[in-house]
Image: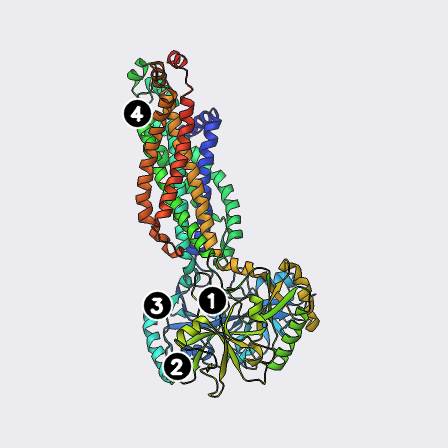
Amino acid sequence: MQTLWQDLRYGARMLLKQPGFMLIAVLTLALGIGANTAIFSVVNAVLLKPLPYQAPEQLVVISNTQSALELADLQAWSRSFAEMGGATQQMLDYTGGSEPLQLHGGVVTGGFFSVLGANAALGRTLDYNDDKRGGALVTVLSHGLWQKLFNRDPQILGKTLPLSGQSYTVVGVMPASFKSPRDEAELWVPLQVANPLAASFRGVHFLRVYLRLKPGATIEQATNEQRQLDQRMREANPGESKNRQTVLIPLRERMVGAAKSALWILFGAVGLVLLIACVNFANLLLARGATREQELVVRVALGASRWRLTRQMLTESVLLACLGGAVGLVLAWWGVDLLVSLKPENLPRLEAIKLDTGVLVFASAVSVITGLVFGLAPAWVATRVNVSGSLKEGGRGTVGRVRQRLRSALVVIELALGLILLVGAGLLIKSFWQLRQIQPGLNPNNLLTLRLELPESGYKEIPKQVQFRRAMLDGVNSLPGVQAALISELPLSGEWLNHDFTREGWTLPLGDEPNVETRSVMGDYFRTMQIPLRAGRDFTPQDKENAPSVGIVNQTLVDRFFKDESPLGKRVRWARDAPDAWMTIIGVVGDVKHFGLDMPEEPTLYTPYAQTGAAWKRYGTLVARTQGEPTAFAAAMKKQIWQVDPQLPVTRVQTMSEVMALSFAERRFNMLLLGIFAAVALVLAGIGIYGVTAHAVTQRTHEIGIRMALGAQSGDVLKLIVRQGLTLALLGIAVGLAGAYALTHVLKTLLFAVSPTDPLTFLSISLLLMAVALLACWIPARRATKVDPMIALRCE
């Protein structure tokens, strides 16, 4: 221990004598370790930490949504599960504050909390006794809502909350650690009490169902049983369940599966950055070893063993690595904040991302391992001293050629790694550029969107809903410079709704009808969104409640169901509606990229709100095209809405451009991070080849002086030095191209309209890296041409 302490003190003194070297080494490692620590904090929180539920390995989820009646059948028939529960999200209006708010409500079945093994921090959770039609209006609050609205009032139990026109009694508060698996619920209410209508239809699939395996049961056994239950349900309900096919997925896979591939790719990329930083670190240690050769020769002459010298140099490299790790932690702390601010909307478990003990252990381990592994080769080379040879040569290094070859090899490696990262970033950038060229089918400029949801208590019947919407649209459209309309499911927002569909003349068996998207609109929607009308006419004010039912279809629906014929005048209906509930197609509009710019459009049928016949469709988004900056009109539009109903919350006030940006936020997130890593790699690679070339110039000063004394021109010297650096660059690029060709296929899932081996990207990145290498070689080469032959020979 005393010897180790002596090594540390001596190493610290030696490093302080070379502050420039120490600063460069520490910052180089800090970049690599900090970036790795920041990304590892995300990987650890999202992929590695256990889910915050009791025995999470026993939890599975059904891949597609279920109806309440289907869940009841599963509970009655299944033998593989100890517990199961369902949940959906519903916006609830809270009118107990200074202005109306809309809260994210979790509408849950009686088994929801028990299947997750969740207990309340105050009071109790909801159970099967609460989830009964006609039951008491009770609610459980999240810890965040309890804190935000009620200042953590310890007497909250038993108090009532006005929610969507009804008074709910608070029976419990959940702990801060509890989150619903797949939504942002701020409070929870029983399904049969809050939405008994939706719970009564077998064909209304809206519940995410969570199941807990019995002890000893496996997901394979449960899947085999589920196949039998699916067959039983198909036979019992051929209309609604004819094509039923259930897939069971572990809850962890369902929650993080979409993010897993991208996160591991980013973690691999940042690992390459660390490798490049470590290679640079090793190069720095090799260069420093050259300056200390005489010191080491003297120490060997005085009796120091090679092991003693190696241990001393490893101690110094580990000390440097730990300092780099400490600075890296500071960078990681900033980096985590940056990652959270840049996060895509669907990044799961965001609240768990932090620099916790596990992350600190990771950073410490990386620092120590880096110091040992990448300090070993420089220490081994530096301690290969020949005492008699070194002294006879007047101090000239005896292992210079070995050191130079090793440094050159390290530069080739870091250039290859840098090219792999740059190619990956280039592919993502090109993919993102291709995505941005896709036309969404509407004009998002100068378009403002506002989310509205009418409470059931005041708008249970369709006539009242229509009356509000007309008065609201009339008020908003009266504002100067505003053209407004209403849509039930806003494009690119993640909202969608579909129904089984049939057309006049079809004789399909029940359950075989195709599925099409349905949108309800009001006002001059297509003109407001600037969606082109391709044939027929638009909706008019005459298409109201008592008028003949009409619909407008998109081009995809025409191409799929009306090939080689005009759809105008044809009659269609929803398959579960009455046989005479026909709608006449009056128009065809262009396709809209509803699900994402990289997703195909689905067949879609637009209908007027007044003719939907769906009293439950109380939600919608107000869209308004403005003459000027859209957000400047938000306050005036809210005022017009509140003149019609002052208790109605207005939420999600966004421009359509912001909605579009959120739809490809995940791709932008991946591109930005990989681009940052690639830029760091490019800088480090440039520094690496510069360092090797500069060191070579220093070592060859005598040779250059002789050449110039014998008549060599500056251009000859310039070519000599640059040729040496470019040879290394070409070797690095060749190795990097082979590595990139082999590795970029893992990016396939992140790319759009770009091949993982896109030749243009590979060529342009190679030229970029060659240009950086040329610049890095030219600077020391230019300095070599300034060598005075007489001074060089005299110094020698």
Label 1 or label 3, whichever lies nearer to me, is 3
Q: Are marks 4 and 3 in contact (CB under 8 Å)?
A: no
Identify which residue, 85 or 239, lies in the foreground.
239
Q: Does label 4 or label 3 sit earlier along the sequence?
A: 3
Could you tell me which residue is drawn at 66 percent across and 63 percent down? 481
Label 4 or label 1, whichever lies nearer to me, is 4
Q: What label sits on residue 46 in the rendered view?
A: none
Q: CA distance from mark 1 to mark 3?
A: 19 Å
Could you tell me which residue is drawn at 51 percent across and 66 percent down? 491
Identify which residue, 217 or 67, lies in the foreground.
67
Image quarter (top left, top right, bottom left or bottom right) of the C terminus: top left
Q: CA distance from mark 1 to mark 2?
A: 37 Å
Label 3 or label 2, whichever lies nearer to me, is 2
Residue type pointed to by label 4: Arg
Q: Are marks 1 and 2 in contact (CB under 8 Å)?
A: no
490 lies above or below 631: below
Specify few, some or many for label 2: CA neighbours under 10 Å numbering under 14, 14-19, or 20 or more: some
Label 1 or label 2, whichever lies nearer to me, is 2
Q: CA distance from mark 3 to mark 2?
A: 29 Å
Q: Are marks 3 and 2 in contact (CB under 8 Å)?
A: no
Residue type pointed to by label 2: Gly
Residue 675 visible in image: yes
Residue ID for mark 3? 219
Q: What label sits on residue 401 in the rendered view?
A: 4
